[in-house]
Every structure is written in C-alpha cells, then in structure tokens.
Image: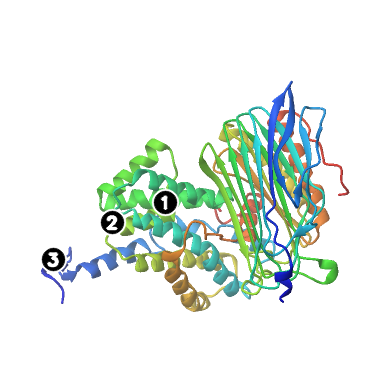
C-alpha cells in the first residue's frame, strides 16, 4: 500500500460569521469540521473580535481540502490569526494539499488577518486560493508570509509545486489578482524575476473601499519612505504600490523571516493611523 | 489559389494579397519605433540593475522567465481582446479584460505604463484607420473611465485588421521583449549584436507561449514575477532614473 493511501484525507471546513451586538463584534461559528477549529473569540478594547484559527492536524497533508468562509456584517471588526505556522507536508504521489479562504466584507466592516508563515516542506504540492469581496467602505489588512521550506533541515525551494492565489474584488470588480505558481524544478527561483538572492516572501494588502486616489497616493508615499528605511540590499527588500483603486500592496523579500514579520506590523500601524486614526493590536506572539 | 477579393490596390500602386497587407500593418504596429512611448519604460528592470540584482550574464535567463510569466499574461489578455474583434457582445467583456489587465499588475508604475501605451496605441490606430469597433472601445474607455491596456488594445486592433491570432501574439511578445532588451542596452553594457542574439535565442520560448495561449483559461493564469513587481514598486525611490517605470 502506498503511504498516501493509508492517510485519511480531510475535508475540513470552517464558517465564521461576525455580527454586531451592542457596538461589539461577536463571532458565530456556523460550521466547523476537523481539522479546522475555533475555540472562542476574544473581545478587544476597541470592539474588535479577535479569533485564533486552529488546524489541529498541525498542517496540510496531500489530498486535504480545507475551506474557510468568513462573513463580516455591516460595521463589524474582526482580527484573525493562526496558532502556528502552516506546514505543508510532502506529497508522495500527485495529490495536492488544498486550502481555500473566502471572505465577504460588508459595508464599513474591517478585517485584519495576521497568519503565521506558510512552510512548504520538501516534495510538497500546495494550492492556496483566497478570495476577498469588499463592499463599500469595507477595510482590509491581509498578510501572507512564505518560507522557502525548512531551512534548518537544509530545505530551500525543495517543494514540488506551490500555487498561491489571492483575488480581491471591490464592489464586484477585480481589484487585485495576485497569483503565483512556483515550481522549482522548472523555474530557477534565484532568478531576479522571482526571488533573486532572497528566500522569504511577505505580501500585504491594505484596502479601504471608497477613498480617493489622492489619499492612497499620500499613504503610498508615507509607506514607501518607511519601506526605503527598511530596505537593506542583500538582506531585505521592500516595495509599496497603490492598486488601481481602493488600496495598496506591500511586498517584501528577505533572507530571513524575522525581518518580514516584525516590519509588516509597522506598515499596518502607519496605515491604520492614516486610514482609521487608530492604532492596531498586534497578536500576542514572538516576533 | 488566391481569390479575386484577396487582391487590393495598395497606396504604392502595387497589387498585393490581403494577407500581405495585414502583415504590413502588423509589422508597423509592432515596430519598436511606433510612437507610443514603449522605449520609456523598464517595468522595474532599472531597479534590478541599480541594485546589482541583474547584469548581462543573467539577462538571457531573466528574459526567458519574463516571457514565460509576464509574456504569458500579456498574451492571454491580447488573445481575449482579439476574440472580441467580431464579438456580438462587446462592451462588458471589453471592460472586464481591461479590469483584469489592471488587477494582474500590482506595481503602479508598470500598470500605468501599460495603460498609457494602450491609450496611445488606440488613439494612433484610430487616426490611421477609424474602425467602428475601435471607436466603440475608445468611447467605452471614456464614458466608463477605465484604462485601456496595451496588450488588450493590441489584440483588438489586430482583430480589426484581420490579423491571425498566432501572428498577433508572436508580434506582441516580440515587441515587448525587444522593448525590454532595448531598455537593458541603455543601462547595461549590452552590445547590439548581443542584444539581437538574446532576442533570437528567445524565439522558441516566444513560440511556446504563442502555442499555448489559446488553451489558457482565466483560472489557469498564475503569472509570477514577484521580484520584478517589487523592483517596479521601488523604482520611484531611485535617485537617478532613465525610465518612467
């Protein structure tokens, strides 16, 4: 029997609804199927609902199909984080580990998503699909962190295939289609078109629907100045750019994960102050 | 055998085939000397060179990946637009393909370059031959306040001129690759012969992209140029810049 045939494939699902009750956002877990789980939400001082997303399997195995849907009602605020890195285990055959997230943000809602790093192990095959729909005045801070593998084990770009899609729609129109397919056996990832001499990738999407282009240009300039101060050739590169409307995107490449994780929060601190006039809460973790 | 209708009297007074006439028009529109401003953009390559990430030695490999990733995206967009040339339903698909073009370009300067080149190409085409569909595309862009991206316009214009999809895609890919090589010649010690050799060696890659484009779907598209995109995002920070993007 093949090792892959012995493993039970998981079809995990998590459906989270955030609604407003007495000026505070509260979570209702509409559905959860292992290995995805949420224990409870925690109310932050500003009324935000703070939620830890658990994957009790410890990672995503080949053949797993995990889906999460997140619905934010009008004027709700939610912050989500993972409890550990997302480990993508090796695939013995041709089965792909698959994870999808779909977030619907109603008018004037705000979603902050702070996951830990995704670590694709050697020989892994992974497809992650994210779709985010933003209604009028909805706000978003969404980060993704990607490692080249288990570097301590000498793994660097040893996975077989990685596909990461993040499609963001605002008012029903595509705002950003950020997709990548990485296949180290077919692509030379040290090519400067891809990673160059860097190994870790951070991507941040900051949006608030309805703000005019001038405000985004001003915020871009502010974040770009910060990006310039954090860019150190040979160690860490940052870039910031306005999207066609309603938001901006931040991209970092680094030789290590720590530079990216610590700096990512500072971008949101600057942006949240500019967009909402408040400071964000950093999930309690070791950065 | 050519049919009677295939012969036209060209402005030189020489009888030529429709196919040859279409080819002439394609050669003109895909020429790097076309005055739409394509030589003013590096799409982030200037940053990569300034940061020491890209040199002549790695240029062949870089360009090959560029064609496979960014080239595939532009070819897809051009092909979608080409199919709209004679489509009954035009307005919404035209808006959609240009929306997609913008959404696939996260770096502002590169996205803006694509939009400016598209606008200028459409404007130029209308001044050369005001076809109704091109006028419709232009009117929609103005009334709906959307940007028309270069590859989309290139595909649509080619369709109007009865240029075959394969020839259109090959010309588009060659033009965008040559533009980048010409940009590299301004910022790297890259000789003219070497530049032509680079382009020549990319022909099989261009051909492969052309061949696979008609079967690519929107869901398949996953163009990855994270390093170049990030470099384009940093381009405004360069102290001295030869290029707009």
The residue under the point 32% across, 64% down is B26
Residue where numbered disc 2 is placed = B160
Q: Outermost residue, right direction?
A: A286
Quadrant of res B229: bottom right
Residue depicted at 74% across the width and 69% down the height:
A6
Corner quadrant of residue A195: bottom right
Crowding around mark 2 (Cα neighbors within 10 Å: few <14, some 14 to 19, many 20+) is some
Which of the 4 quarters of the picture holds residue B242? Answer: bottom right
Instruction: Give the image location of residue B73, x and y in percent.
Output: 50, 60
Q: CA distance from mark 3 to mark 2?
A: 17 Å
- To the question of a shared chain for discs 1 and 3, the answer is yes
Q: Which residue is mark 1?
A: B118
Q: Is residue A153 above or below residue A102?
A: below
Q: Is residue B106 visible?
A: yes
Helix, strand or loop status at disc 2 = helix
Would you name the residue on which mark 3 appears? B5
């Amino acid at each position: 029997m093949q090792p892959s045939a012995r493993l039970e494939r998981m079809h995990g699902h998590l459906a989270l609804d955030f609604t407003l009750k007495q000026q505070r956002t509260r979570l209702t877990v509409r559905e959860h199927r292992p290995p995805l789980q949420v224990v409870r939400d925690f109310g932050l001082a500003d009324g935000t609902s703070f939620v830890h997303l658990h994957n009790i399997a410890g990672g995503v195995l080949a053949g797993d199909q995990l889906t999460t849907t997140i619905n934010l009602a009008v004027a709700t605020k939610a912050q989500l984080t993972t409890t550990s890195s997302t480990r993508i285990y090796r695939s013995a055959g041709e089965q792909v580990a698959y994870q999808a997230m779909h977030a619907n943000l109603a008018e004037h809602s705000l979603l902050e998503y702070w996951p830990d790093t995704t670590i694709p192990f050697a020989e892994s095959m992974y497809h992650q699909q994210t779709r985010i729909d933003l209604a009028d005045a909805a706000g978003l801070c969404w980060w993704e962190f990607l490692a080249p593998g288990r570097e301590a084990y000498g793994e660097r770009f040893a996975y077989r295939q990685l596909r990461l899609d993040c499609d963001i729609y605002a008012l029903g129109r595509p705002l950003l289609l950020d997709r990548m397919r990485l296949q180290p056996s077919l692509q030379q990832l040290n090519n400067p078109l891809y990673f160059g001499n860097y190994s870790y990738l951070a991507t941040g999407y900051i949006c608030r629907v309805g703000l005019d282009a001038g405000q985004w240009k001003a915020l871009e300039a502010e974040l770009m100045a910060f990006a310039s101060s954090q860019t150190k050739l040979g160690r860490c590169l940052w870039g910031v750019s306005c999207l066609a409307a309603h938001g901006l995107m931040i991209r970092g490449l680094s030789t290590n994960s720590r530079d990216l994780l610590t700096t990512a929060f500072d971008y949101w601190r600057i942006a949240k102050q500019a967009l909402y006039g408040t400071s964000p809460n950093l999930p309690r973790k070791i950065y | 055998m050519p049919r009677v209708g295939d012969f036209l009297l060209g402005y030189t007074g020489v009888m030529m085939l429709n196919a040859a006439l279409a080819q002439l028009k394609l050669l003109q529109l895909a020429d790097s000397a076309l005055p739409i401003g394509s030589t003013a953009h590096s799409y982030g390559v200037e940053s990569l060179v300034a940061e020491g990430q890209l040199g002549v030695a790695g240029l062949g490999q870089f360009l090959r990946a560029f064609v496979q990733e960014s080239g595939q995206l532009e070819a897809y967009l051009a092909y979608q637009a080409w199919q709209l040339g004679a489509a009954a339903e035009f307005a919404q698909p035209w808006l959609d393909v240009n929306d997609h073009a913008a959404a696939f370009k996260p770096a502002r300067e590169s996205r803006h370059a694509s939009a400016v080149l598209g606008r200028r190409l459409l404007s130029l085409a209308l001044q050369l031959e005001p076809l109704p569909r091109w006028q419709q595309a232009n009117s929609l862009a103005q009334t709906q306040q959307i940007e028309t991206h270069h590859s989309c316009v290139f595909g649509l214009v080619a369709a109007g001129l009865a240029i075959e999809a394969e020839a259109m895609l090959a010309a588009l890919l060659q033009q965008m690759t040559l533009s980048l090589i010409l940009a590299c010649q301004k910022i790297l010690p890259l000789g003219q012969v070497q530049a032509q050799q680079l382009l020549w060696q990319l022909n099989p890659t261009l051909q492969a992209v052309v061949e696979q484009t008609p079967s690519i779907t929107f869901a398949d598209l996953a163009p990855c140029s994270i390093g170049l995109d990030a470099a384009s995002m940093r381009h405004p920070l360069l102290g001295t810049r030869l290029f707009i993007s």
